[in-house]
């Protein structure tokens, strides 16, 4: 079992969110709150607050990218075989609508072949509180066995 998955199960979502931000402090800029974490799936929320806004008062594109990298990374960590390592090597994004509310960022990656070494594409989507997709991304993770 991945160290992150064990931590999530032992600490619970709120304390795990704080712990991840302690390990990778940049993630604290969006104050993520984990909702779920399991092999093939990770989900967080980002509160709509001034510190993550852009100049027009919506959630900034880079805050969305930060959330995408967080869910893709934690999902990858809990999904790859024991002893494997991973590193993000690329990201493509699309902005579909203005992010004006709290945001839910999720990766549904059950169909990803986690057993393969090399580059793996992890899909991510972000939704507003009405369920409208505001952002999507593909994070390329390099997995080494």
Image (cartoon, rainbow, N blue to C red):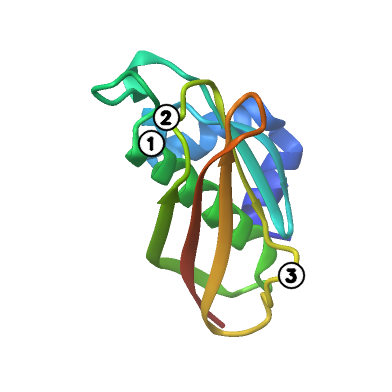
- Mark sitting on residue 30: 2
Residue tagged by mark 1? Answer: 63
Residue at figure coordinates x 36%, y 29% from the top left: 29
Q: Quadrant of residue 21?
A: top left
Instruction: Give the CA distance from mark 3 to mark 1.
Output: 26 Å
- Mark sitting on residue 85: none
Residue tagged by mark 3? Answer: 111
Residue in front for this viewpoint, 133 or 120: 133
Q: First in sequence: mark 2 or mark 3?
A: 2
**Which element is circle 2 on?**
helix
Q: Mark 3 and 1 residues: CB-CB less than 8 Å, in contact?
A: no
Q: First in sequence: mark 1 or mark 2?
A: 2
Q: Is residue 137 above or below residue 97?
A: below
Would you say 37 lies left or right of 100 here?
A: right
Q: In x, y percent, where is residue 11?
A: 69, 32
Instruction: Single out the residue that lies furthest toward the top.
Output: 50
Q: Is residue 133 above or below residue 115?
A: above
Residue in front for this viewpoint, 29 or 137: 137
**Which element is circle 1 on?**
helix
Q: In x, y percent, where is residue 42?
A: 66, 48
Residue at figure coordinates x 46%, y 69% from the top left: 140
Residue in front for this viewpoint, 134 or 70: 134
Q: Mark 1 and 2 residues: CB-CB less than 8 Å, in contact?
A: yes
Q: In x, y percent, where is residue 39?
A: 74, 58
Instruction: Single out the residue that lies furthest toward the front.
Output: 97
Instruction: Give the CA distance from mark 2 to mark 3.
Output: 28 Å
Residue at figure coordinates x 54%, y 70% from the top left: 121
Would you say 13 lies left or right of 23 here?
A: right
Crowding around mark 3 (Cα neighbors within 10 Å: few <14, some 14 to 19, many 20+) is: few
Q: Is residue 4 visible?
A: yes
**Which element is circle 3 on?**
loop
């Amino acid at each position: 079992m991945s160290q992150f998955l064990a931590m999530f199960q032992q600490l619970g979502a709120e304390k795990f969110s704080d712990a991840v931000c302690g390990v990778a402090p940049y993630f604290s800029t969006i104050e993520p709150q984990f909702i779920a974490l399991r092999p093939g799936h990770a989900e967080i929320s980002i509160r709509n607050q001034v510190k993550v806004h852009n100049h027009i008062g919506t959630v900034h594109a880079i805050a969305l990218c930060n959330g995408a990298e967080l869910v893709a990374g934690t999902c990858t960590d809990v999904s790859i075989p024991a002893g494997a390592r991973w590193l993000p090597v690329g990201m493509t994004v699309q902005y579909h609508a203005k992010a004006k509310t709290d945001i839910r960022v999720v990766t549904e990656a059950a169909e990803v072949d986690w057993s393969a070494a090399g580059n793996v594409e992890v899909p991510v989507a972000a939704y507003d509180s009405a369920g409208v997709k505001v952002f999507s991304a593909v994070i390329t993770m390099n997995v080494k066995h």
